[in-house]
């Protein structure tokens, strides 16, 4: 069986659909990560205000350094946690964006292999 014009047209339409799905996933991913960073910025501002209040409430220099040390430790922990979340989020988005094209590539390889086998 040889490929017909309709087969070729259907294959190309599926490719176009995959591109649309890829663009949709990319837009959704950009929206998701933008919202994440806006939320993170708001939380960071609130944390900075709270930290300032805690530092201002210190009654001695020793207490000031203790508070500052604790805040520094918490900041490092937060940076590590948020870095992990961003990494997981971007990995998920990358998979969602590339999945439709990857699927089409697999179909293309399968069709090409079948065609080559029949031609041999």
Image (cartoon, grey):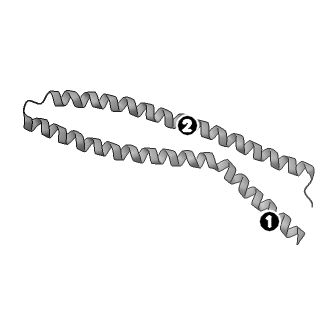
Q: Which mark is residue 20?
A: none
Give coordinates of residue 84: x percent, y percent.
41, 48
Q: Residue at image x 85%, y 64%?
A: 115
Q: Quadrant of the N terminus?
A: bottom right
Residue at 50 percent of width and 34 percent of height: 34
The answer to whether residue 78 is left or right of residue 15 is left
**Residue indicated by mark 2:** 30
In which quadrant will I find the C terminus? bottom right
Judged left or right of residue 11, residue 46 is left
Residue under label 1, please give it.
Answer: 113
Query: Dot 1: few (<14), some (14–19), or many (≥20) neighbours within 10 Å?
Result: few
Determine whether the residue tagged by mark 2 lies in a helix, strand or loop. helix
Q: Quadrant of residue 22?
A: top right
Give the residue drawn at x 20%, y 41%.
70
Residue at (36%, 31%) from the top-left corner?
A: 43
In the image, residue 3 sits, relative to residue 120, either above or below, namely above
Residue 92 image offset from top left, x and y in percent? 53, 47
Say if 111 sits above or below 120 in the image: above
Other residues around mark 2 within 10 Å, as few (<14) / some (14–19) / many (≥20):
some
Precedes in sequence: disc 2 or disc 1: 2
Q: So how many labels did they put on this image?
A: 2
Tell me the CA gap for discs 2 and 1.
36 Å
Contact? badges 2 and 1 (CB < 8 Å): no
């Amino acid at each position: 069986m040889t490929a017909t014009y309709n087969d070729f047209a259907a294959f190309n339409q599926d490719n176009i659909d995959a591109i649309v799905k890829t663009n949709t996933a990319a837009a959704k991913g950009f929206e998701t990560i933008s919202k994440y960073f806006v939320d993170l910025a708001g939380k960071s501002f609130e944390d900075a205000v709270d930290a300032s209040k805690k530092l201002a409430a210190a009654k001695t220099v020793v207490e000031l350094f203790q508070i500052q040390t604790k805040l520094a430790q918490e900041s490092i922990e937060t940076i590590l946690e948020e870095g992990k979340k961003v990494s997981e989020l971007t990995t998920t988005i990358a998979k969602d964006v590339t999945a439709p094209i990857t699927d089409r590539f697999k179909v293309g390889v399968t069709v090409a292999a079948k065609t080559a086998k029949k031609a041999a």
